[in-house]
Image (cartoon, rainbow, N blue to C red):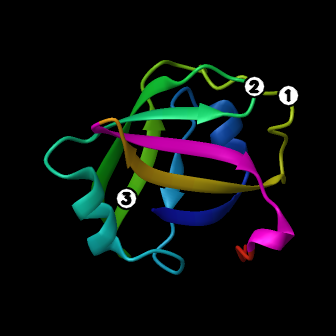
Amino acid sequence: MIRFAFRVNRSFLTYPGHPVTIPKSQTDYREVAELVGPSDEVWVSTEGSVPVRGIIYWGNAGFGDYYQLRVRSPMALQAEWLQLGTLVEVLLYRADGRVEVCIRPWNHARGVAA
């Protein structure tokens, strides 16, 4: 399982794909590549929402390689608790033969740093 903290930002709230860049500072990109494998498809859910299809996008920018989570269904993640500045925990894991992504409220007791 891969997990990291993410602070909900304007691009997450306003862009149709709800992009979340997977931070190099909190994750090992080799683990992301191994988890996702040859398929980039994932299922994304939040508390209070139905899972929707998404992708883990790989790209390269001036600062180097990066992975970004994107939802395929525009503006599909509708959860009232996802407000600007909210700290959330993002979990990536394999279940039932597919990659699942869970976005849930951050809990200090779980020890994830922002």
**Residue contact at pointers 2 and 1, CB within 8 angstroms:** yes
92 vs 56, left or right, is right
| Among the 4 quarters of the image, the one containing residue 54 | top left
40 vs 69, left or right, is left
Q: Tell me if residue 107 comes above or below residue 26 in the rendering.
A: above
Q: Which amino acid does label 1 sit on?
A: Glu
Numbered disc 3: secondary structure: strand
Work out which residue is located at the far front of the displayed protein and give it: 96
**How far apart in space, not on screen, are marks 1 and 3 (Cα)?**
26 Å
Location of the N terminus (image quadrant): bottom left
Magenta-tinted stretch: 97-110
Q: Position of residue 57 (x, y in %)?
A: 32, 47
> Residue at label 1?
80
> Residue at label 2?
48
Location of the C terminus (image quadrant): bottom right
> Residue at label 3?
67
| Among the 4 quarters of the image, the one containing residue 6 | bottom right
Q: Where is residue 111 in the image (x, y as percent from the top left)?
A: 74, 77
Residue 106 magenta-highlighted: yes
